[in-house]
Amino acid sequence: MADPIDFYFDFSSPYGYLASTAIDGLAARHGRRVRWRPFLIGALYKQLGYMPLEQPGKRAYFLHDVPRSARAMGVKLTIPASFPEALIAPARALYWIADRDEAKAAAFGAAAYRAYWSEGRKLADPQVVAEIAAGQGFAKETVLAALSDPKVKDRLKAETDAAIAAGIFGS
């Protein structure tokens, strides 16, 4: 099989969510698999000294374009009242799960994205993240412990740094 597609995304990105609903089908049509690679886009923006949604024109266009794009793709999407927010827990959980089972990590990623952008669940809440991971067969208590494990925290930081070094510029 050909090299995997590295799908870089931040759970807080609605465009990343929309891409997540199509990436597996795209990969399958080309005989590829997808490696889900969350990173923290806030770290990138901090490094760039730029917060796009703080620009009034960009924010207004974003609030128009995201729902329009979702409708065009036939994807249910509602911008959460808490948006934008840092969604660190699901990114940590995905890497922890991926170290155990890459297919379950992809399923978790899709479920977590859907929970936030389609179902209105509070993805910043570790309890919610643990519930979603439980749907992939992981014990909630084990997932909650992993979310505060320094090795898991370091992994997400390293993956974020690697994404930025690779030239990732958005999600």
Image (cartoon, grey):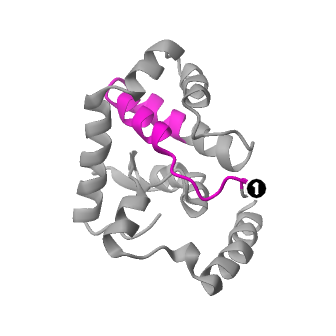
Q: Is residue 1 visible?
A: no
Could you tell whether 151 is left or right of 84 in the image? left
Q: Which residue is mark 1?
A: 78
> Which residue is rendered at x = 34% and y = 23% of the image?
100
Residue at the far bottom: name it: 57
Q: Main secondary structure of the magenta part?
A: helix
Q: Find residue 85 and report its horizontal and vertical position in percent.
A: 57, 53
Residue 109 lies, with reference to residue 12, above or below; the image says above
- The amino acid marked with disc number 1 is Thr
Q: Is residue 90 magenta?
A: yes
Give the x, y percent position of residue 150: 28, 30
**Between 27 and 102, which is closer to the camera in this rendering?**
102
Residue 12: quarter of image: bottom right
The boundaries of the magenta stretch are 80-109
Residue 126 coordinates in the image, percent (x, y): 54, 30
Is 79 placed left or right of 30 in the picture? Answer: right
The residue at the point 41 percent across, 28 percent down is: 147
